Structures are given as C-alpha cells and as structure tokens.
Amino acid sequence: MSKKTIHDKAYKYLFSNPLIVKELLESFVAMDWVHYIDFNSAQPIDKSYVNDDYREYEADIIYKLQCKDSEIYLYLLIEFQSTVDRFMAFRMLNYVMELYRELYYKQGQKRLPIVFPLLIYNGDKKWNAATELQQLIDIPEEFKQIKKYLPQFKYYPIIENELSRNELENMMNIVATIFLFEGSDKEKFLKTIDRIEKLMQIYSKDSTVIRTLLVWLLHYLKTHSIIGDIEPFIENKLHPEETYTMLSKTLETLKEDLRKEGYQEGLKLGIQEGLQKGLQQGLQKGLQKGLQKGLMQGIVKGKKEGLMLGITKERLKIANKMLRNGIDDNTILKITKIDKKELEQLKKKI
C-alpha cells in the first residue's frame, strides 16, 4: 500500500468518528445550525453508489444528521490531489446529485433533504478553484436574463494551507492539531507533538476519540517516514493510554534525534556561512591590499621610467650637437653613452 493511500485512509478513519466531525463543524463552519446538531445520533451513510471516477484521488464521508426536527446530510469530501481541480464545484454537485438519486429513486423519499457539501483541501498549492457552479458557466451579456434559471450550487471550502497557524494553536482540539501537523516543519512538528499529552487529558473520558487520534497520528508518522512499524501500537488489545505510553517513549527519542539533527544542521550551516563570509572578507581585503600595492609599484615604476626617458632625450640632444661640430663617432658614443643605432638615426636626420 502506498504512503498516499495510507494517508487517505487515515483521514477517512479520523472522520469516521462523529465527535471529530462535530469538532470540525463547530471549529471551522461559522453557521448557527451546527450547534443544534445531535452528533450522538449521527449515522454514517453507505457510499457504494457513488461514481468511482475520482475514487483514487479523494476520500468522501457522508453523515445523516438530526437538527432539531429536521434531517440534514453532510457530504464531506477530502481532497488529496497535488493539483487544484478548477471544476471542483461541478464534481461536488455531481456527488450530491448521486446522493439525491439514491434517496429519491431507491429509498422513495418524497421530498429531498438538505445536503451540506463540505470540502477539506489537504494539498500545498493555493486553492483558486471556483466555489460556485455558475462561476464555471460562460454567460454572455445577451443571456444575463437566463442566469437565474441556471443551476445554482456552492460548496463550503476548508483550505488547510490558508488557516492561520496562530488561530489553530489557540484551538486545543483534535482537528486543529491534525491541521497543525499537516503544515509543520521540524521545529513546528516538535511543538505540535507536545499537544498530544494535553489532548489525552482533555478527552480522557472518551477512549474512542483518543484512539482515533492516536491511530491517525501513527499513520501520519509512518507516511512521513518518521517511524517504521506501527503494528505494535495499534493492536486491539492495547488501551489508548497504553498505546500513548508506548508512543510517547518513541516520540521522546524522536524529538531528541530531531533536536540533535537540527543542532548538526545548524552547526554545518554556521560553518558554511562562516567560511563563505571569511572568504568574502579575505578576498575583499586582499583585493584592496593588492590594488594599493599595485598602485604604489606603478607610481615608482612610472617615476623611474620617466626619469630614464628624460636622461635619454638629453643624451641624444648632446650627441646631435657633437655631430654638427664634426666630432668623431667613438668620442660621441663614449661621452653620451648612447648606442650605435641611436647614433646612426641621428646622422640620417642631419
């Protein structure tokens, strides 16, 4: 079984617990009716009738809920695709219509109930898909009058990567903790792990909720290659507290390893930055010193060459006068120290 499949099934298992669905709705769906739902009577609905076109890409859970004297269906779709499907509104409508088809044709309901379509997006990319069906329909200006007769449908999105981490940290519940894990780096992961013990205390009277959380966490750790074999932790014989005791020892070891790894990475990064900074400073200092030395050498060399050029010109000037006065070549060469080639060139000019 692939890591992705394990992760998907873990999410399905998580929201198979009505009390965790209760947390999801009460924490992330800002609507009054949520608080009137009797989650103790929540009934999961068989989804075998749903079209299989997207089965490998998503997890969907359906509940029939009682809200005062009315029934409402929750269609929860958990989207695991790495890419964003801009036609999600159409897909969600299709699933809802499949549910209505089941209720009308097979169960013979005379009136259709409310179905609340809820999407959880678990991917890393920005969610920019339309939430309303009409946003996907091309409606030219001349057909604006038809708009009110076109299908109207909208789903409620919970986009994990858009949720405020500060707000999630202030929610001490299971769903917020799950979302925190999904968006954690190593440092944040260690901080999020520490929430588990607090949750164990908060939900101490409900072993099913605790077990659901721990099983999800174990699959999460396995999916991310943090731990290997999870079977010893999820044997049916173990009570959730025993499972957590075993898991906590593993997590403490893991946290220590991650801290050491973080220290080593920090040390390595520090050495690299130090070397790079030292090299840059050395090059800059060396270049500056080299330029200064080169400039001084250039000045000295220039002065020396200028002096020699002046002396040579003066010697040629004296040799020229001696030639005009009829003095012989040997005497001129001996006195002026010029070479024979320079003397011959002077003769040609006279």
Image: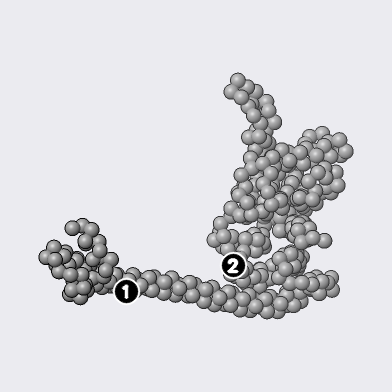
Mark 1 Cα within 10 Å, few/some/many (few <14, many 20+)? few
Instruction: Please give the name of the residue rendered at 84% of the width and 49% of the height, measured from the top-left corner.
Output: 46
Mark 2 Cα within 10 Å, few/some/many (few <14, many 20+)? few
Residue 151 coordinates in the image, percent (x, y): 69, 31
Above or below: residue 261 compared with residue 10: below
Above or below: residue 167 compared with residue 335: above
Above or below: residue 32 compared with residue 17: above
Label 2 SS: helix
* Residue marked by disc 2: 188
* Residue marked by disc 1: 293
Q: Nearer the viewer, residue 111 or 3?
A: 3
Residue 338 coordinates in the image, percent (x, y): 23, 70
Residue 48 coordinates in the image, percent (x, y): 86, 47
Left or right: where does residue 341 sit relative to residue 25?
Answer: left
Q: Name the N-terminal-most of marks 1 and 2.
A: 2
Instruction: Please give the name of the residue rendered at 63% of the width and 22% of the height, measured from the top-left corner.
Output: 143
Residue found at the very far top of the displayed protein? 142
- Gap between marks 1 and 2, in whole Å? 53 Å
Left or right: where does residue 322 sit relative to residue 247?
Answer: left
Q: Quadrant of the C terminus?
A: bottom left
Residue 42 bears which disc, if any?
A: none
User: What amino acid is labelled 2 in the image?
Assistant: Lys
Q: Nearer the viewer, residue 70 or 315?
A: 315
Residue 77 coordinates in the image, percent (x, y): 73, 49
Q: Nearer the viewer, residue 101 or 218?
A: 218
How many marks are shown on the rendered structure?
Answer: 2
Instruction: Please give the name of the residue rendered at 21% of the width and 62% of the height, measured from the top-left corner.
Output: 346
User: What amino acid is labelled 1 in the image?
Assistant: Lys
In this view of the protein, can residue 97 be seen by the observer? yes
* Mark 1 or mark 2, whichever is nearer to me: 1
Q: Quadrant of residue 207?
A: bottom right
